[in-house]
Amino acid sequence: MAPAGTQRGILERLDAGEIVVGDGGFVFALEKRGYVKAGPWTPEAAAEHPEAVRQLHREFLRAGSNVMQTFTFYASDDKLENRGNALSFTGQQINEAACDLAREVANEGDALVAGGVSQTPSYLSCKSENDVKDIFKKQIDVFIKKNVDFLIAEYFEHVEEAEWAVQVLKTSGKPVAATMCIGPTGDMHGVTPGDCAVRLVKAGADIVGVNCHFDPLTCVKTVKLMKEGVEKAGLKAHYMVQPLAYHTPDCNCQGFIDLPEFPFALEPRILTRWDMQKYAREAYNAGIRYIGGCCGFEPYHIRAVSEELSQERGLLPAASEKHGLWASELKMHTKPWVRARARRDYWETIKPASGRPQCPSMSVPDSWGVTKGHAELMQQKEATTQEQLQPLFEKVFPS
Amino acid sequence: MAPAGTQRGILERLDAGEIVVGDGGFVFALEKRGYVKAGPWTPEAAAEHPEAVRQLHREFLRAGSNVMQTFTFYASDDKLENRGNALSFTGQQINEAACDLAREVANEGDALVAGGVSQTPSYLSCKSENDVKDIFKKQIDVFIKKNVDFLIAEYFEHVEEAEWAVQVLKTSGKPVAATMCIGPTGDMHGVTPGDCAVRLVKAGADIVGVNCHFDPLTCVKTVKLMKEGVEKAGLKAHYMVQPLAYHTPDCNCQGFIDLPEFPFALEPRILTRWDMQKYAREAYNAGIRYIGGCCGFEPYHIRAVSEELSQERGLLPAASEKHGLWASELKMHTKPWVRARARRDYWETIKPASGRPQCPSMSVPDSWGVTKGHAELMQQKEATTQEQLQPLFEKVFPS
Amino acid sequence: MAPAGTQRGILERLDAGEIVVGDGGFVFALEKRGYVKAGPWTPEAAAEHPEAVRQLHREFLRAGSNVMQTFTFYASDDKLENRGNALSFTGQQINEAACDLAREVANEGDALVAGGVSQTPSYLSCKSENDVKDIFKKQIDVFIKKNVDFLIAEYFEHVEEAEWAVQVLKTSGKPVAATMCIGPTGDMHGVTPGDCAVRLVKAGADIVGVNCHFDPLTCVKTVKLMKEGVEKAGLKAHYMVQPLAYHTPDCNCQGFIDLPEFPFALEPRILTRWDMQKYAREAYNAGIRYIGGCCGFEPYHIRAVSEELSQERGLLPAASEKHGLWASELKMHTKPWVRARARRDYWETIKPASGRPQCPSMSVPDSWGVTKGHAELMQQKEATTQEQLQPLFEKVFPS
Amino acid sequence: MAPAGTQRGILERLDAGEIVVGDGGFVFALEKRGYVKAGPWTPEAAAEHPEAVRQLHREFLRAGSNVMQTFTFYASDDKLENRGNALSFTGQQINEAACDLAREVANEGDALVAGGVSQTPSYLSCKSENDVKDIFKKQIDVFIKKNVDFLIAEYFEHVEEAEWAVQVLKTSGKPVAATMCIGPTGDMHGVTPGDCAVRLVKAGADIVGVNCHFDPLTCVKTVKLMKEGVEKAGLKAHYMVQPLAYHTPDCNCQGFIDLPEFPFALEPRILTRWDMQKYAREAYNAGIRYIGGCCGFEPYHIRAVSEELSQERGLLPAASEKHGLWASELKMHTKPWVRARARRDYWETIKPASGRPQCPSMSVPDSWGVTKGHAELMQQKEATTQEQLQPLFEKVFPS
C-alpha cells in the first residue's frame, strides 16, 4: 500500500506505453444501490453515505482499475442547488469527502486519484466565461488541497466549455485529461471530434478522449477521429475512452439522453462481459491506453476489460479469483449442459435474446434540437413548476 | 434498532395480513461485484469479504426488505467442495459468518433474519434420505445456535427433497417457509405446483411458494396454482414468491438455466423498475404477502416493489429519499425533453428497445431432459476433467 | 387431360394412402392482385375477372395441387350482400362461374374439383338451423349441377354450424371434407378439437381437419388433437390441414383476425419456402395426407410442399422446372457469394431478419371476447354507419 | 384504347409535370408464381408462358402503372446462356415476345411501352467496350423493330457500363432513361450518385435515377443526391426511382444481394401498403416524378403508390374498386374489432410484428468486396462445377 505521491503518475505510465484501466460510472451504479437521485444526479452520497461510495471504489479497484475518480460529478455549486435540489451538504463538504474516500481506497492498491469536473448549468444558461471558470476554480481548490494525482475535465457537450475547464485545471500544475460526451458527428455545435481534440490539446490537455453518451464501439470510433485530428495537426497527446455500458446504435448526436429509455428503462441495452472484452480489444488496437467506463459500468464490466488485457498488462485483477477466463468456472456447475458452456467460442459468438418479444430492437430518439442558448435550457434554482412542465408534456403528447 | 427477538415474527406479520418484502438474490449481485464465483455459486464471501456482503444487506434493507436472508445458499458441505471448488473456509465458518452479518444489518431496521438451506448435490447423486437430511441438519445447527428468526428451504427442483428439508427444519421449532424453483408445469418429475404445495404444507411448511428459475409473472402464476391446490385440499398456508429479475418467456420446465444465455449473457432480459411494480401488484392481487426476489434482483428492484406497495404498507423505504414515485425526480433534469418524462403514463407503457438489432427476442432453451438419477448429474469432489467435458461439448457442437 | 369423372376420386386416393396436395388461399392472393376486396372478402371475381382467377388456379396446379377449390368462399347470398357490399352478380352466377373455372383448369392436369361452403353471417346473427341450412343448400345445388368431385365445408368457428353444413353437404352423395378455423383450444365456445372432430365425423364428414386462422405448425398440432379424439372414439376419418402462410405465435383462440396486423400489415409474418418444407414434413409425419394452404399461400408455397414430399409422391410439380431443390439453381448466379448459398444447410437453418428494427417480434392480440349471439356480431344488409363505427373506435382509442 | 404512338410520350408527360407511375418487378413476382428461375433470373417466360406474363402486366396496369416495361431483364445472349442456363428460346424470340405482350396490355389502358436493357456478364468478365455495346445493340434492334415508346437502361452497378448502354440506346432516337442499382455511397468503384448522374446525363439520358438493390427510402435518398449533383453541374434531367419492396436498413454498398436472406428468405422484409404510401409521398416531395418499383413489388404495392398520389394525378387506379382508401372497406367486415381498424391513424402508425421471436431484426451482410475484374466474377457458358463451388462454400463455413 503506497502513500500518496509515491505511485508512478498517470503520465509516467502512459509515456511508458502502459495500459491504464479506468473505473466505472458512479452515478448510475449508486442510483441502483439507492444512494443517488436520477434527475439531479448529484454526488452528495460521498458525504451522506460514505460506506456505499467506499465499497464501490473498492469493487472497481478489485476489478483492476488504476484510477479512483473522486465522486464529484456535477458537484459544482450551481448544479447542486439547481431546480430545487435541496441538499444538506455544501459543495465543499462533498468535494472533500469524495477526495478522502478515493484516496483511502487508492492507497489499498495500485491506483491514482483523479479529481473531476464536468459541464455546468451556468454554461448552458449562457453565463460569462469568468463565471463558469469560477465554478471550476472552486472545485479545483479542493483537489489541490487534497492533493489528488491528476485532474479530469469530463462530460462536456460544447468544446468551448471544455477548453475553459482545461484552462482552469492547467493552473494546478497537475496532469490534465479532457473527455467530451460526443459521438462521431462532434459537439452540439457541430465541431468535429478532430477539431475538438486539437482545441483541447492546445488548451493544455495531456490526455484527450470521450466519455459517456454512446456505446463502447461508437466511443472508440470517435476517439480514433480525435487521434487522426491531433496527428494531422502535428500535435501529441494520450488517448482515453470511458463509454456507456449500454448499446446505443439508435442514437443521434445528443447520445443516450435522447433515447426514450433514458434513464429508467435502459436495462435491455446493458453490455455483457463478452461485449466488454471486444470493446477493450478494439480500444487497445486503436492506440487508446486509458480505457475505462462511464454510466452503466458495473465492477464486472471493468473486470472484463482487465481480463481481456491481462496479457498486455501482465496481471489479472484481484476479482478474477472469482472468475475464470472465458467462463472456465462453469466446469464446476452441477448441470452438465451448463458445464458444456465452459468454452470461449460459446460466449464469443452468443447473440443474447431480450426475452421481450413485444419490444423493438431500436428506438426513435428524441430530437428536440435545443442546446446552449435555447430558453428551455436556462437553469434555475427554484423547483420546476407544473406550469413549466406542461408545455414539455404537450410537446410529447399533444392534447 | 431492535435486538434479536423483540421484533414481531414472520407469522405474526403474515397472520395480521401484512406485506413482508423479501430481499434480492445475493449470488448474482455479488458475482457482478466480484465476490462470488459463477459455476459453484458458493457463499464463502460471508467469511472472506464480509464488508461486501454487509453492504448488500444494507442496500436491501434501505430498499424496504423486511427479511435479511443469511447468505448461506449452497453452503452445505457437499456443495462447498463439489467438483474441485477448493475453499479456505469450512461450511460452519461460512454459515456462522453469514448469520452474524444478517443479524447485524437486520438490527439496523425493521427486519427479521431467515436461515436458508437449498438443494444438495447429494440428492442429485441419489444419496439416501438420511444422508441428505444430515446435510440440512448440519446447517440448521448453526441457525439454531445463532438464533435466526425463521427458516427457509428454497430452490428445490424435486418436491421429495424439499419435503425432507422441511421435515428437518421443522425440528427447530421455528417457522418454516419452503419455495421450489419450479414453473407452472411442476417439479422435475412432473408433480404439479398444486400437489407440491400440498405435500410441503403437510410436511410442516407454514409458508409455501416458488423462487428463482422463472420471471416474476410466471412465478406469480405458479404460486396461484399452489394456492389453488392447498385450498382445494382444505389446508391453510401463507404464500411467498421470490422470482428472477429476468424475462424468461422462452423457458421450459427447467427454467433459466436451460436458456443459452445462462449465466453470462442475461443482461438484455433484466427487468426495469416499472416491470417490478407490475410484478408487485400482480403478486399482491394474487393473495401473496411475502414478496421478494432472487437472482438478478438489485436493490432498486426491491425498492420498486416497496414503492408499488407503499400505500398498502403505509410507508416508503429509506432509499426512496433518492427516488421519486413514477420518475418525478426527472423534473430536476437539466434537459427539457428529459423533464418531459417525469410522468407515470410515460414509464408505465414504455416498450424498451434492446439496442441489439442482430439478436433475437427469444431463444431456444436447451432441453437435455436429464434429472436426478441420470449419470451426468452424479456430483463429485474432484474437478471436472477434460475427458468429462468433451462428450458434453460434442453434444452441443458435434464435430 | 382427363374429362370430369374419369379421375380417381378423393377417397380413392386417400384410402390408397396417397398424399393429396391442396391449393392455396384465393382471397388473399387475389386481394394483392387487385381482384378481391378485403372486408367483405367475397369472390365475385370468378364472374367479374375470370382470367385472373383462372391464372391463379393454373399456378397452383403447376405448383403441384391435386385439388382446385371452386372460388366460392363467402359466396352465400347473405354474405354477398352483407353491410352494403353491393355486387352486380348474383350468388348463383358467381358459384357457377367458379365451378367452370375450377373444372377448366383441373382438366389440364391431375386435379379434382372441390366445391366449398363456409361460415355464414346468418349463423352469427342467430338465424335458425333451417335458415342456415337453406343457405348451404342453395350453394350445393350449383355444385351438384356442375358436378364437382367432392365438397368442403371450411372456415367454421363453431362446431354446431359446421355440423349443419356437413349434414347438408352429405345429401349430395359426394365425399365431404370439413375443416374448422380453430386452434388447440378449440371452437369459440370451447369445444375441444378432439370433440369437434368426433362430431363432424358423426355428422358424416369423410375428411376432417382445420384451415386458416393459425400458422402451419399450430394447425398440424390441432389436427393431431382431432386425430387423437377420433381414434379414441373408435371412429375413422382422413385428415386435412390448410393453414395460414403467416407466423402466428402470438394468437389467442380467435386466430389471426385478432392480431393488430390483420389484414393489411401481415407481411413480416409470411412464411418462407423453407418454413413450408418443414410444415409439409410435420404434417406428413402426423399422419395427415391432405396437405394444402389457406390465406397467405402463394403458388411457391404450395410448390415447396410438393417438393418436400416429392419422394413420397414420386413426382415433382411442373413449376419445379423453375426451381432447384434446396436452392441448387443459385449455382447459376453471377455473384460468387450467392453461389455459395446453393446448399441445403444454408437455407434449412437461416433465421431471417425482418429489416424492421423499430418493430417488435410479437403483438398483443385483440381479445374482445364476443362471439355468436353478441349484439356486435349481428350482421345487416345496410352499410355500417358512422354511428355504428364510433363506439368501436372508442373501444380502441378512448377519447 | 389507344394504338401505339397516339399516346402522349414519356417526356411530354414529365415535361408537363405529370406523375408517371412505373410497374413492379417481374422476375421476383413471376418466380413466386412459378415461371422464373432464381439464380439465372432470365425472362424466357415471355415466350414460354405468355399468359402468365400478360396477366402480371394487366395487374400492374390495373394498379395504376403508366409504363409496361418489356419483360426483357437479363435477356442479353451472354446472360441467357450463362453458367449452363440452357433455354429453348433464342434471345431474339424472348425479346420480341416480351415486346408484343407489353404492347398488347399497354393498349388496354393509358400506358407506354418501355424496352429495357441491363448489366451484362460480359462487362463483369472484362470484355471490351465494343463487345458489351454489341450486346445492347442486339436488344435495341428488337425494340426499334417493335417500336417501343422509350428505352430504359437499368440495374447497372458500374457507371461506365451504364454510360455505354445509354450511348447505344441514344442511337435509337427514342427517349432514354437510365437507373443504377446503387445506394448513397455510389457505384462499385465508389463514384458518387451525383457524379454517376452527371455522367449519365452527359451520355444522353433524359431521365436518371436508381432501381433495385435498396429499400424505397434509401433509393429516394440516393436519387436526391443524384439530383443535387445534376443541378450543381448546371444540367437538367427528369428523375426516376424504382426501389425494392424490401426493408434493407442493414445493407452495405452492394445492396440486398449481400444480405444473407437473398433471394429465398426475404419475406419478413416485405413492405406493407402503408410503407408504400410513405415512399410515394417521399419520392414526390423529393421532386421525383417517375415513381415505380422493382423486385418484391406486387400489384398492390403499385396500387398503394397510385392511391397515395391520386389527388395529384386526379384519378384512382382501376384496382381501387377493390380497395378503400386507408382501409375503409373494413367497415364491411363481420367482426366488430376488425371494423374498428377502418381508420387511417390505425394503419399509419402500426409497427407490424414479425411473428418470428427467434429471428433478429437486422442481419450482417456478406462483404466479399469483389467486383468487376475479380476472378470470381468471370462468367462462363458452362455450368458451375462442384470444384468451383467448393472454395466458395469454404469461404462461408471453413471446414
Image (cartoon, coloured by chain):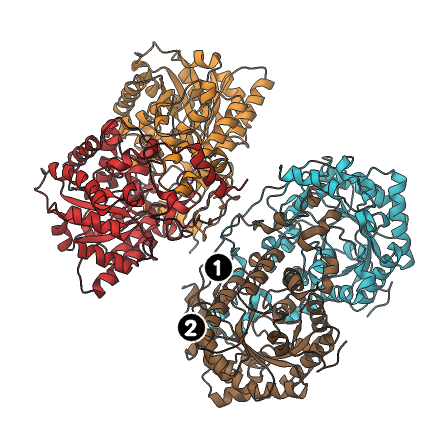
Chain colours: A cyan, B brown, C red, D orange
Q: Secondary structure at mark 1?
A: loop
The quadrant holding residue A61 is bottom right
Camera-side residue: C215 or A315? C215
Q: Name the subunit of mark 2.
A: B
Q: Which residue is mark 2?
A: B192
Judge from the rendering whether residue D275 lies leftward or rightward of residue A221; answer left or right.
left
The quadrant holding residue B322 is bottom right
Residue depicted at 67% across the width and 41% down the height: A393
**Residue B132, percent from left and from top:** 51, 86
Q: CA distance from mark 2 to mark 1?
A: 19 Å
Q: Which residue is mark 1?
A: B249
Quadrant for the N terminus of chain D in the image: top left
Q: Name the subunit of mark 1.
A: B
Residue that sits furthest to the top in the current view: D6
What amino acid does circle 1 point to? Pro
Residue depicted at 18% across the width and 54% down the height: C203
Residue that sits furthest to the left in the current view: C6
What amino acid does circle 2 point to? Thr
Which comes before the other along the chain, label 2 or label 1? 2
Check residue A373 in the rendering and tell me which mark sits there, or answer none.
none
**Residue D359, percent from left and from top:** 45, 50
